[in-house]
Image (tube, grey):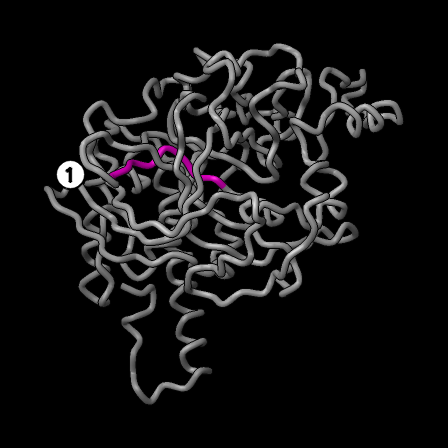
Amino acid sequence: MDDFEYFDHPDATDEEFQDHEFWARMKHQYWCYIIMDYTHRGMTKSKDRLVAIAGIGKALSRHTKNRYLAGLWSEHFTTGLLWSIAHNEKFAMSTADTFDVEKNEKIRHEQELAPSWSWASVTAPVMYATNELLNYDRICIIVNVNVAGNIDNQTGRAQIRGHTRRGYINAVYPHSIREAAARFPHMTTTNLTGTLGREETNFKDRMFHPNDWFLFSEKPPSTGSSDTSTQRLTTHGSFRLVRGSFKPDQIIDPAQEITFVAIAQQHFGAQLTTRLPSHKEDDALKVHSIALVPTGKAEGEYRRVGLAIWEECAWYGYLCGWKDARDRIVEKPGRWTEDGQWTKEGRLDRLGRRLWWDDLEYYEETKKGSHQHAYEANCLPEMGKYHKKVNVKETTLVIV
């Protein structure tokens, strides 16, 4: 099943196809706005999350060849998968945010009512990167998607073939995952109200923003779940910082192996002077993947536990363009000034970074050389784009 297989008129020109694809993506972008608006509204019963919008979905499906699949659409299934529970993004549209996060004790429904790949499987508000939707290129193959059940409770199986990597995540949790706030307060971002810009996480005497970096390890962590502690950084630490962001859907054990499947990518860069995004072919690659764990019920069957965004070619084992993002650095924590300003690192800090932080940060990444950024859209990436140390496989898996 191809994202745009429904537009197959044999006489269509390339220009007509591109125009049709653009407007189709625009319409899906509107749907994503609806989902964000809908999930940010207060609901009396969380179990109504799927059924309350199903009527709209069924009505729209009657006028298109699009299949409505537990809150997602068949013809835009790949981009539909890329929802997340935000660390700090604020949503504002036609209504104020009326969802009471503090009273939302469980991030997953007590009884499953939607597939884990659907935004309806979580109880908190969700976000789409709507400003990027028009620039996503699919880099996986949706083999098949099936949904069964009643309008208020559905199961689903999505069979996907794509490139996968495995590793371990030490997650920084959004404030809306209240179970994490109770168990790991030092690894949970603050409430969005009045604290925008101060969501940095202090991990082992280093401070970073969860939208800029995430903690990842290719090998099992040496100390298991205790790696979520605030102990000082040692040269034998398991996790290192990767440029990008990991947005969990639930609490994740750092000792649990995660399978990441690449869903979409785009050229993404920004100029220091204007901060405006760029999508030129020589810009670094931003890869969107979903994080999976085995269900334990069948071989090759997984469920979703988060969204991982690998920026500046991190998915491919490189770090391209980091010198152009000077404001996305890792700092020593606890240096807010009395007037509310954050003091930048000094000369000794920079020296210490180069000498002792390599096991946690990105300096070793910059020594790996370079690779080509051009790619062919809507197909699996070339294996030659990966650094030789990256263990990547082409895999067919099922997500439920």
The total number of labels drawn is 1
Q: Is residue 29 visible?
A: yes
Between 113 and 253, which is closer to the camera in this rendering?
Answer: 253
Q: Could you tell me which residue is drawn at 27 percent across and 63 percent down?
A: 1
Q: Could you tell me which residue is drawn at 39 percent across and 16 percent down?
A: 179
- Name the residue type under label 1: Asp
- Residue 295 is left or right of residue 361, and the answer is left
Between 226 and 20, which is closer to the camera in this rendering?
Answer: 226
- Relative vertical location of residue 177 with respect to residue 323 in this rendering, above or below: above
Quarter of the image for residue 11 reads bottom left
Q: Could you tell me which residue is drawn at 28 percent across and 37 percent down?
A: 302
Which residue occupies the extreme left position in the image?
A: 150
Q: What percent of the width, then of the height, locates residue 151?
A: 14, 43
Q: What percent of the width, then of the height, locates residue 14?
A: 44, 82
Q: Could you tell me which residue is drawn at 27 percent across and 72 percent down?
A: 6
Mark 1: which secondary structure? Answer: loop
Residue extent of the magenta highlight: 301-308
Q: What percent of the width, then of the height, locates residue 338?
A: 80, 15
Q: Main secondary structure of the magenta part?
A: strand
- Residue 25 is left or right of residue 371, and the answer is left
Q: What percent of the width, then of the height, locates residue 231?
A: 62, 10
Quarter of the image for residue 336 reads top right
Asked if the magenta segment contains residue 366, the reply would be: no
Dot 1: within a 10 Å radius of its alpha carbon, few (fewer than 14), some, or many (20 or more) residues?
some
Between 30 and 263, which is closer to the camera in this rendering?
Answer: 263
- Relative vertical location of residue 73 with respect to residue 12 in this rendering, above or below: above
Asked if the magenta segment contains residue 305, the reply would be: yes
Please give the residue where the numbered disc 1 appears in the rendered image.
Answer: 152
Which residue occupies the extreme bottom position in the image?
A: 11
